[in-house]
Amino acid sequence: MTSAQLLSLLQLSDPTLPIGGFSHSAGLETYVQYGIVKDKVSANEFIRAQLAQNLFYTDAAFVSLAYDAAQEKDVWALVRLDAECTAVKLPREMRQASQKLGLRLLKIFTPHCANSLADAFWKEIESNVAAGHYCVVFGLFASVLNIPKQEALSAFFYNAAVGMVTNSVKLIPLGQQDGQEILFSLHHLITDLAGKALTPDRTLIGWCCTGFDLRCMQHEQLYSRLYMS
């Protein structure tokens, strides 16, 4: 990977990118309020399960497939993946979060990439044909920016892990050292998942833990909330 590709990947996967990721907990807030995630050990278990049993079969698979569609310059394949992503995200807040993050990512990167495929996908969103989910947009721009696919997937998983660790530090709360130790412990898992996600099994997309969806739905009814999802 060249220095230019590395810089593009760092910016694309930067946890501080101003797309609003900090305002979403992916249901973690419910787990914390219910006393299920309450310390470093349970936070580590939650994050590992989210990465391996949820994201691997949903968002990461869509990143991989969107990357392939972008390589083929197939905007309709991107639109179909985007619709499938909407279908597998059962909690309303998770669908909305995914769409909001994707649209903001598009607004940041589209003006600087000068790419006809990204422009075409944006037009489908403006026409209400596509929603513009974050994972699809991430895969699109990873391809447009010529970032190697495995590195893009590794960065996608890492970005998700950093977000969950940051939320755990705030919500449980944990010490910053605890958060970094969790991240170190995830390196091998992220590498393994990224390698497997290079060729996702289409028949398994949407196969995830029902508990995650239920906690996300329960989040909508929490008495007090710090996060939007």
Image (spheres, grey):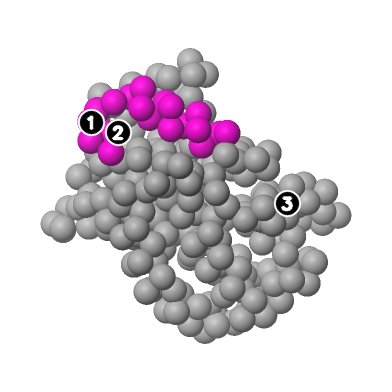
* Amino acid on which disc 1 is placed: Glu
Which one is in front, 111 or 50? 50
User: In x, y percent, where is residue 83?
Assistant: 50, 29
User: Magenta residues: mostly which secondary structure?
Assistant: helix
> What kind of element bears circle 2?
helix
- Residue lying at the far front in this picture: please name it: 203
> Do tag 2 and tag 1 residues touch (Cβ < 8 Å)?
yes
Q: Residue at x 52, y 84 (%)?
A: 177
Which span of residues is magenta-colored?
68-87
Total numbered labels: 3
Query: Is residue 96 within the magenta segment?
Result: no
Residue ID for mark 2: 69
Q: Mark 1: give few (<14), some (14-19) or many (20+) Cα within 10 Å.
A: few
Residue ID for mark 3: 214
Q: Is residue 31 among the parts visible in the rendering?
A: yes
Q: Residue at x 60, y 68 (%)?
A: 46
Residue 72: numbered disc = 1
Q: Residue at x 33, y 24 (%)?
A: 75
Query: Is residue 82 within the magenta segment?
Result: yes
Q: Mark 2: give few (<14), some (14-19) or many (20+) Cα within 10 Å.
A: many
> What kind of element bears circle 1?
loop
Instruction: Name which of mark 1 and mark 3 comes first in the sequence.
Output: 1
User: In x, y percent, where is residue 94?
Assistant: 62, 44
Q: Is residue 102 left or right of residue 77?
A: right
Say which quarter of the image contains residue 106: top left
Q: Is residue 10 among the parts visible in the rendering?
A: no
Disc 3 and disc 2: Cα gap in Å? 32 Å
> What kind of element bears circle 3?
helix
Q: Residue at x 48, y 24 (%)?
A: 130
Disc 2 and disc 1: Cα gap in Å? 5 Å
User: In x, y percent, where is residue 39?
Assistant: 67, 80
* Amino acid on which disc 2 is placed: Ala
